[in-house]
Image (spheres, rainbow, N blue to C red):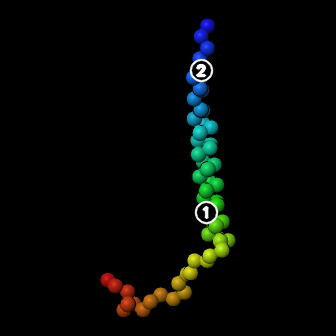
Amino acid sequence: MRISRHPRRPDPLVLLIVFVLVGMLSTLTYQLLIEYGARSIPIATQSPPAVGVGG
């Protein structure tokens, strides 16, 4: 009997679960950094006059 030294292929379901978990964790981390980050992003409180907007 020959002993096979080939590694087993990973289960596609396990790969899908790992991929989804990494995506969810990266999204959650991004949202937390945006919400509670040290640097706040300035938000416009007033739009420029209509004459100043090109078009």
Residue under the image location 55 percent in, 81 percent down? 43
Residue 37 location in percent, x, y?
65, 71
Across and down, in percent, residue 46 comes to 51, 89
Residue matched to label 1 = 30
Tell me the residue at 62%/65% (across/down): 31
Which residue is nearer to you in this view: 2 or 36? 2
Element under disc 2: loop
Per the rendering, the mark at residue 3 is none
Which residue occupies the extreme top position in the image? Answer: 1
Query: What is the residue that sits farthest to the left in this orientation?
Result: 55
As drawn, 2 above or below 31: above
The residue depicted at 60 percent of the width and 37 percent of the height is 13
What amino acid is found at the position of numbered circle 1 in the picture? Tyr
Q: Earlier in the sequence, mark 2 or mark 1?
A: 2
Q: Nearer the viewer, residue 55 or 3?
A: 3
Is 5 rendered above or below residue 24?
A: above
Q: Secondary structure at mark 1?
A: helix
Where's the C terminus, which quadrant? bottom left
> Dot 1: within a 10 Å radius of its alpha carbon, few (fewer than 14), some, or many (20 or more) residues?
few
Quickly name the residue at label 2: 5
Callout 2 amino acid: Arg
Q: Quadrant of the N terminus?
A: top right
Image spot of residue 54 (x, y percent) = 34, 85
Residue 38, above or below 1: below
* Numbered disc in front, either 2 or 1: 2
Q: Residue at x 58, y 45 (%)?
A: 19
Label 2 vs label 1: CA separation?
41 Å
Q: Are marks 2 and 1 in contact (CB under 8 Å)?
A: no
